[in-house]
Image: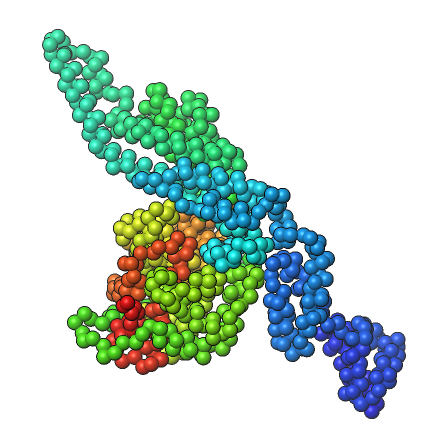
Amino acid sequence: MKLDREFVLTYLNGKQIGQGGYYGTDLSDLAKVMNVTYRAVRMRITKWIKEEPDFFNLIYLGKSSPSITLDEFIEIKDRIQSNPLELKKHILSDIKDKRELRNEDTLSTATFYRRANQVELSLFTNNESYRWFSERKIKIPNFYSVKDERESLSNVFHFYNLKAYGGADVEAIYERFKKAKERFSRYEVAPMRFYPALLTRGTKLRSLLTSIPPAQQEEIQARIIFEIQVAFVVECKDVLIAELLHRKGRDQQSMDDSRQRLQNSIRKREIDSIRSDIGDMVTISRPDMERLKEIAYPPIGEEELSKMELLRGKKKNYELIRDVLNLLTNGMKEDVTFHTENSQRIYDLACGENMWKFWTDEEKSNFMRDPPLVNAINQGNWDIAKLKAIDRIVEYIRNGKITFKESYNYQDIGARIREVSINEGDGFLTPEILDELVKGTYTVNIQPLLESVSFNGLEYDENQDIPPFYVNFSDVLKEVSRYVREKTPGWFDEHIRVFREQTNGMFSMEYTEEEFAERLYAAIGYLGRNMRYRDNEEFWNLRYFIQRYISEATLMLEMRFIHRCFTTITGNEVEAVVIDTMGLDNRKKSILATYHGRYHKIGIADLRAVSTDMKPIHSSGCCSTDSEAMNMVSVMDEVQRVCGENVRIYTGDAHTVSRVCAGMVFLSHDVVAAGRLSKKPKKRLGKKAIAHLKENILLLNKVGKLLREEPTLGRAIAMKEFIFVDGVNVRKLIDDLGYLILLNISRISIPIHEICNAVELSNYLKRKTRIVEASYTRVEKHEAGLLLKSSELVISIAGLYHLITGWKGPESPFNLSDIRLYIPA
């Protein structure tokens, strides 16, 4: 066969594009296709390369292609260098999967390990230990001991014994933080550098460490211990600052409660004094004009006297706050940023370094905002100025005018927003949408909130007959497990992927699919029903599996699979969710257990999201002092991960909605907040505010992108009033955008009361699921999420079981009336 020049050129150009040139093996394949000898092809191509311009750029790469390509070699090197503790079998598995997708020959295991070992030797010395630390420039002390560091997690890096009678022991929290920071300083790195990477798996670290015997895998232990220490140092600082703010808030509340009573007491004392003086004047038969003038024009009024007396009564607490802040930041000189010009001066006044008497009258008036009190201080009450300065510093920390570099909740979020890169047109907010919001013509589809709402039928009535038969919950678990795996191709592969992500590739799956599924569903049943290991011998062997393999990400993945099964059976896509909370008792001695004013519980709040037909979707434990709205970005992020991005609206009671919340969830997830409004917005937004919004659409979309990538920042933003980016208060922009959204929503009639009543029935069902020990949550707050999510899964599993077996009972299949959750001894 004659060599076809155009055919050869097309073939070689394809190789040039695909692999950067051609190999001798490619010429052999070409010779076979053209039915000529290899020598004939090679000689003709050599001639054409010398004579034909079209062939000049073709590159000969060698006799045969290497067993590992350059891209694969770079991937191996990068992954070993970035994470030396990752199992090499994971890297090999990923490369083989990519080759399979490209329909290429598989990579030899021996070849891979030979190259991987060569890379490892080039990056690390033979006797180098703690490679993960050295790669990140983390110093390991000469006296470092994994055993000692593991013991420090029980001695130093924990939140035990930090409560005193009446609340948090601020001094004890500071001492604990001081010890932890001093011990952590040996690494010579900043903890905040590593903390953001722990947000998605930080709650899993302690249980993961517990699953490793003390004498095994010391290098992995060292890394996990380091990450636990990082999380504790950052979170302990946040807890300390929060408790300082709460201490000031409780003092203010106490003073407000006592002010009227104290003012009445001062007035009574003054009246008695006036009567006595007037009586004296009567006895001497002539008035004392000087005394009458003092009575008519007292130098300090009763209101100012009461303020000063109340402040002096709290002097010890105020000075404690100041002293702790001094120690925490080395006199506000380290790891702290002042975002306003006068913050430093006010702090100096609080510390006595800037005397009140040297301030001008205008400066005093601007600072105090209370002329009569300024007059009272000027009469020698200098100590009141210091106390008011401490009060103002706490206010600045709370509203974001003072931020801390080594804190997460109180960090400078403006700097994070400034670093976000975004292109014009990215994000959910556009000029057209903003114009619609301003005009009040923005279209909100509330139909998903009105469809499939079940207002009854979540539980049998007490007066109804006993079901004809009961099904053991263990049988329900087995049936649903089989069904979900059957309907979900790649079920086990997805769980392996999530397990690798949660453990950062340091561990391998030890179970087959059948063994993993059996233990996973048994663990869900155990955790979801609030059981203890000793309650049933079936639970005895679950401890290791739960410690190593169960994480919140694992449970939410299974929730997503179960949700897909619901959608396949019913055909109903979830497009709206309902938000509510339940109060839960927790370990009362824990510093992280706080009193909930509405539920009168000491513990945490169970923040739930359910679909309008009452399918459980999300559950997480949040601080009792938080509103639902503060955590809504995290909630909607998880809801969309489970249900998909079709969820575009949510509703709930008044605590689920605020201006900043409405702005954040729209910017981050294109979700409209349509909850109950305690105060409906009536006025239109001002012209200046609207113009400011239009000028900063790109900046707002930066906020949305940051929140999509790191949803936990939503709570940190909601806690503040000021977030500055190049002189612009982004927090005010988010508030104004949220106001426009709520203004549009307020014109739509939504049956929120009926929807919230339906959620209460679902809450009742969850309390019944966790009825053991009256739903008391015994674990620490960071582990509570496993129990709460597992309970949602128990309800979902019951609902799916009823659907696949032909539910003939009440309206909703989410029902436990015919399932025997507990078998009495």
Can you give x and y, in whole percent of width and height, for residue 728 in the image? 49, 46
Does the image show residue 220? no
Q: Residue at x 36, y 70 (%)?
A: 796
Given residues 342 and 169, the one toward you in this image is 169
| Left or right: 194, with 606 as reference point | right
| Left or right: 781, with 232 as reference point | left
Can you give x and y, in whole percent of width and height, for residue 343 in the image? 46, 34
Can you give x and y, in whole percent of width and height, for residue 494 in the image? 51, 70
Q: Quadrant of the N terminus?
A: bottom right
Q: Residue at x 45, y 35 (%)?
A: 325
Given residues 679 and 317, the one toward you in this image is 317
Q: Relative to residue 589, is residue 283 depicted above or below?
A: above
Say which quarter of the image contains residue 469.
bottom left
Q: Relative to residue 263, is residue 541 depicted above or below?
A: below
Given residues 461 and 318, the one toward you in this image is 461
Given residues 737 and 254, the one toward you in this image is 254
| Left or right: 431, with 248 as reference point | right
Q: Quadrant of the C terminus?
A: bottom left
The number of discs equals 0
Q: Relative to residue 412, is residue 461 depicted above or below?
A: below
Say which quarter of the image contains residue 113.
bottom right
Q: Residue at x 58, y 54 (%)?
A: 218
Can you give x and y, in whole percent of width and height, for residue 755 in the image? 28, 65
Q: What coloring was used for the rendering?
A: rainbow
Of all residues shown, which one is farthest toward the bottom?
A: 1
Q: Relative to residue 66, is residue 330 depicted above or below?
A: above
Does the image show residue 489? yes
Of all residues shown, which one is farthest toward the top?
A: 284
Q: Residue at x 30, y 68 (%)?
A: 822
